[in-house]
């Protein structure tokens, strides 16, 4: 009897616990979004029109009720601009009002204090919350006039603050608003906490960047938008439209009954907020049917909905390495329960699209892989370096749902440098690899290399670890003039514990020919001119004419006159005058000098022949001829 009572009691407890367990298993985590805005004086230059304010108002308007959020500003000190609490209409009104107080008058840029104060109440990770920080800054860590103090603050962020944020499972999304920002720091914070890093060239891009980061921080259900057409079903309790404008044309909404809504002509249950570059429209209990946005087409336009009929998908990491791949599950839920009815699911068309910045979209049909309401696929093999988007869409004759996720793909989590060692007797190259410890663990990293010659010959090596941060491979005795390539295989583990296997693009070993020092080149280039000048500056040999004697009467040589006429006396004199002038002489081209030198040599040879013939004629006169 006692055992029967125990069994009944056990079954009763089990019956009570099962529904609770199911509810907690399917309940969505609450989004916890903390926005931190830089108000230092440099913002006067980088955000002269204070576009941070409308960007914050847009983000505030997109946050659904029931989430938690707060806004902080910082420069030297940190100010809680909008108190951190649950999002509702009163909180939104207060946030919109306070957003007008964002300024650009602060001194210094105390990023450490801003992150600490905005997250001070978070002690540990909590699976019931999806925690995110959006940090916007345009400068370096700057807490005082003492550079050492600022550098120490920067180091504390990396050594102490980031590990605390990571342990509490807080994703920090960072925005660098200027080239002068500390990009390395902001990127390291984002990667270490699995946040998203954005570099913004101008403040005009802030609103779209905030939209992208909002979609990271708060998961909202959306419906597909095609050429500004979308479909609303009866299960949708509220919809929020974000419409970007590039012209002065006002936005209009065409309802299913063809009536039009505008900012000045709206109905009860419509809240219309308009800024210079966008409209944010929230409609309670929207009319079911086909809607149309009469405005400019824009890829960042969104239709977000609140409904019991949701599209749930696997949360993918914000940052992965090239070559990593993941299973992706998608399902439709109603009141947080997966819909498994096959008669309903046969009417659903499920697709997945992979988009990147450098490749054509790839569409995948998910319907064949549906099992008990779960649609499964695999992504990663076709990812490109940079931003990749996964868009899952489910449509039926009565409803449409869509969810978009962005993934940042890092091509190589190591810094690779190649150098040729000039001091070695033979051709030698050294490859140095430094891992990015914000992405991968360095303690169990192994790197193998394969050297390949032009003829296909191969040699394998292990890349040796020099210290905790450096791996090196030195390749000696390479053939001069030979082409080589080095293929690397990298095995290890990401900070999230995922296995890593990478094969970067092969490294080309290019022989650097020894370049002659500039001074030596100038000396060698000067040698030909010096030799020519030396030839021209040699003194002409004096022709010694024999003195006439009584036995050798003076003889008039007719050839002498012709030689004198042939001499370029009129041209030679100016050339000789120029040769005596230092500056003008140096301006004479080498070719001219060579021509003049050759002419002088020919003249000397001619004169010598004439003198020789004259001497010979005199020697051949018979003594009787003079009688």
Image (cartoon, rainbow, N blue to C red):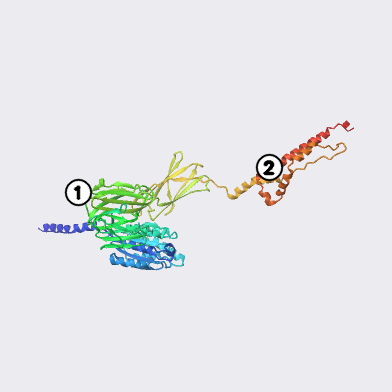
| Label 2 to label 1: alpha-carbon separation | 103 Å
* Foreground residue among 52 and 455: 52
Residue 217 tag number: none
- Asked if the residues shown at circle 2 and circle 1 are in contact, with their CB atoms under 8 angstroms apart, the answer is no
* Secondary structure of residue under mark 2: helix
| Viewport quadrant of the N terminus | bottom left
Image coords of residue 353 (percent x, y): 31, 49
Image coords of residue 355 (percent x, y): 34, 50
Image coords of residue 167 (percent x, y): 33, 60
The image quadrant that residue 144 belongs to is bottom left
Residue 343 tag number: 1
* Foreground residue among 488 and 271: 271
The crowding category of the residue bearing disc 2, from other C-alpha atoms within 10 Å (few below 14, some 14 to 19, many at least 20), is few
* Foreground residue among 473 and 391: 391
482 versus 469 height, above or below: above
Q: Is residue 316 left or right of residue 186?
A: left
Q: Is residue 425 left or right of residue 591?
A: left
Q: Is residue 9 left or right of residue 209?
A: left
* Secondary structure of residue under mark 1: helix
Image coords of residue 542 (percent x, y): 77, 43
| Viewport quadrant of the C terminus | top right
Q: Which residue is mark 2?
A: 595
Q: Is residue 405 visible?
A: yes
583 versus 44 height, above or below: above
The image quadrant that residue 2 belongs to is bottom left
The image quadrant that residue 55 belongs to is bottom left
The crowding category of the residue bearing disc 1, from other C-alpha atoms within 10 Å (few below 14, some 14 to 19, many at least 20), is few
Q: Is residue 125 visible?
A: no
Q: In terms of sequence position, does the residue under pointer 2 or pointer 1 come before the other?
A: 1
Residue drawn at x 72%, y 45% as measured from the top left? 571
């Amino acid at each position: 009897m006692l055992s029967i009572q125990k069994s009944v009691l056990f079954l009763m407890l089990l019956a009570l616990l099962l529904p609770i367990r199911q509810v907690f298993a399917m309940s969505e985590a609450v989004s916890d979004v903390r926005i931190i805005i830089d108000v230092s004086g440099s913002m006067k230059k980088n955000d002269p029109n204070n576009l941070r304010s409308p960007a914050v108002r847009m983000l505030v308007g997109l946050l659904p009720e029931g989430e938690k959020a707060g806004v902080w500003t910082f420069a030297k000190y940190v100010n809680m601009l909008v108190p951190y609490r649950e999002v509702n209409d009163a909180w939104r009104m207060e946030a919109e009002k306070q957003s007008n107080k964002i300024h650009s008058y602060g001194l210094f840029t105390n990023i450490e204090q801003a992150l600490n104060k905005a997250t001070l109440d978070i002690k540990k990770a909590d699976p019931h919350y999806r925690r995110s920080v959006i940090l916007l800054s345009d400068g370096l860590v700057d807490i005082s006039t003492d550079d050492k103090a600022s550098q120490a603050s920067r180091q504390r962020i990396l050594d102490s603050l980031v590990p605390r944020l990571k342990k509490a499972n807080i994703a920090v999304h960072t925005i660098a608003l200027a080239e002068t920002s500390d990009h390395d720091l902001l990127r390291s914070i984002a990667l270490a906490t699995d946040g998203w890093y954005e570099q913004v060239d101008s403040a005009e891009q802030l609103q779209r960047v905030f939209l992208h980061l909002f979609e990271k921080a708060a998961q909202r259900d959306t419906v597909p938008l095609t050429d500004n057409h979308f479909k609303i079903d009866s299960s949708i309790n509220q919809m929020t439209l974000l419409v970007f404008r590039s012209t002065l044309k006002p936005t209009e909404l065409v309802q299913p009954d063809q009536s039009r809504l505008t900012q000045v002509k709206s109905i009860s249950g419509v809240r219309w907020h308009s800024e210079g570059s966008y409209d944010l429209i929230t409609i309670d209990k929207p009319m079911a049917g086909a809607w149309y946005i009469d405005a400019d087409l824009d890829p960042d336009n969104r239709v977000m909905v609140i409904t019991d009929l949701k599209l749930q998908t696997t949360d993918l990491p914000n940052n992965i390495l090239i070559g990593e791949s993941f299973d992706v599950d998608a399902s439709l839920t109603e009141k947080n329960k997966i819909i498994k009815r096959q008669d309903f699911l046969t009417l659903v068309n499920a697709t997945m699209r992979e988009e990147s910045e450098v490749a054509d979209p790839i569409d995948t049909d998910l319907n064949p892989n549906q099992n008990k309401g779960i649609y499964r696929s695999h992504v990663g093999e076709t990812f490109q370096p940079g931003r990749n988007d996964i868009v899952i869409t489910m449509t039926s004759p009565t409803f449409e749902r869509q969810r978009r996720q962005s993934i940042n793909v890092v091509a190589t989590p190591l810094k690779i440098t190649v150098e040729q060692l000039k001091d070695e007797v033979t051709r030698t190259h050294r490859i140095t690899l430094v891992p990015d410890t914000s992405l991968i663990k360095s303690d169990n990293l192994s790197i193998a290399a394969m050297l390949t010659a032009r003829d296909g010959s191969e040699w394998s090596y292990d890349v040796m670890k020099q210290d905790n941060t450096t791996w090196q491979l030195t390749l000696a005795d390479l053939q001069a003039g030979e082409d080589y390539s080095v293929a690397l295989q990298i095995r290890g583990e990401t900070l999230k514990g995922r296995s890593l296997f990478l094969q970067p693009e092969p490294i080309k070993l290019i022989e650097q020919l020894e370049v002659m020092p500039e001074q030596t080149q100038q000396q060698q280039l000067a040698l030909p001119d010096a030799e020519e000048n030396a030839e021209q500056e040699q003194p002409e040999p004096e022709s010694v004419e024999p003195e006439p004697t009584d036995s050798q009467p003076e003889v008039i040589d007719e050839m002498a006159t012709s030689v004198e006429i042939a001499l370029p006396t009129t041209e030679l004199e100016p050339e000789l005058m120029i040769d005596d002038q230092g500056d003008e002489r140096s301006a004479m081209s080498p070719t001219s000098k060579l021509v003049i030198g050759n002419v002088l040599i020919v003249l000397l040879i001619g004169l010598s022949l004439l003198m020789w013939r004259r001497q010979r004629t005199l020697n051949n006169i018979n003594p009787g001829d003079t009688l």
